[in-house]
Image (cartoon, grey):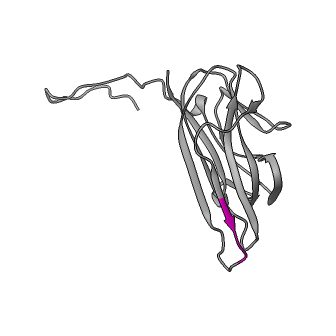
Amino acid sequence: GTVTSGTLGASVVFNDAHKDIDVDADGWMRYPTVDAEATSDAVIVWDGVGKMGSNITYDGTSDYIQVAKAGWYFISVHYTHLAKEDQNVNFVVRQSQSTGATPSGDGIFPRIYGVTMNDGIAYPSQSMSGFVYLAATDRVDVYGTYHLYGSSTIQSAMNLFTGVRLGA
């Protein structure tokens, strides 16, 4: 909100260096709506929408996020393994290697890796996050092997792919 009047102490300093952080424009939160498995490398489908900023595009054919505004982004993936299934989990967040290209490469920060055994452990989870500079029209996706749980709503989502632009 806007403060229209008031008194501030002498030691109060306003810093508007990050006033351009706008999740409504430069943020996303996506989740898968159905259970999914990939035993060989594939891009995870994030077809559920919790939040899509006006400067963010999701390509439902290639399953990547494309940003319209350059800057530093904080990107996070939270992964919950489908309960009690034997499956290797090994995936990364990838970035375009050139502006506007399909994401590729080894990943922009450490991968999620593990072997989940059918040992009675229900819904083991892992998360990864990091900062990455994205140019306008850069794309990011999540790629690898997985066996994940889908959700019908964001409130019940157990897997999330999120990001927000923090600044230039």
Query: In the image shown, does 85 or 40 lie closer to the viewer?
Result: 40
Q: Residue furthest bottom?
A: 120
Which residue occupies the foreground of this view, 44 or 154? Answer: 44
Residue that extends furthest to the left in the rendered view of this protein: 10
Q: Residue at x 76, y 53 (%)?
A: 145
- Position of residue 126 relative to residue 161, above or below, is below
Q: Residue furthest front?
A: 106
Q: Is residue 129 left or right of residue 93?
A: left
Residue 129 percent coordinates (x, y): 55, 45
Above or below, 6 relative to 111? above
Report which quarter residue 158 is drawn in.
bottom right
Q: Residue 121: image x %, image y %? A: 64, 76
Q: Going by the picture, which residue comes out furthest to the right?
A: 61
Q: Position of residue 55 (x, y in %)?
A: 65, 26
Check residue 105 for magenta coloring. no
Q: What residue is drawn where x is 80% and y is 48%?
A: 41
Of 2 and 19, nearer the camera is 19
Say which quarter of the image contains residue 9: top left
Q: What span is colored magenta in the figure?
A: 114-118
Could you tell me which quadrant the N terminus lies in? Answer: top left
Q: How many marks?
A: 0
Q: Position of residue 51 (x, y in %)?
A: 64, 41
* Residue found at x 71% / y 21%: 98
Q: Residue at x 59, y 20 (%)?
A: 70
State whether the magenta stretch is mostly helix, strand or loop. Answer: strand
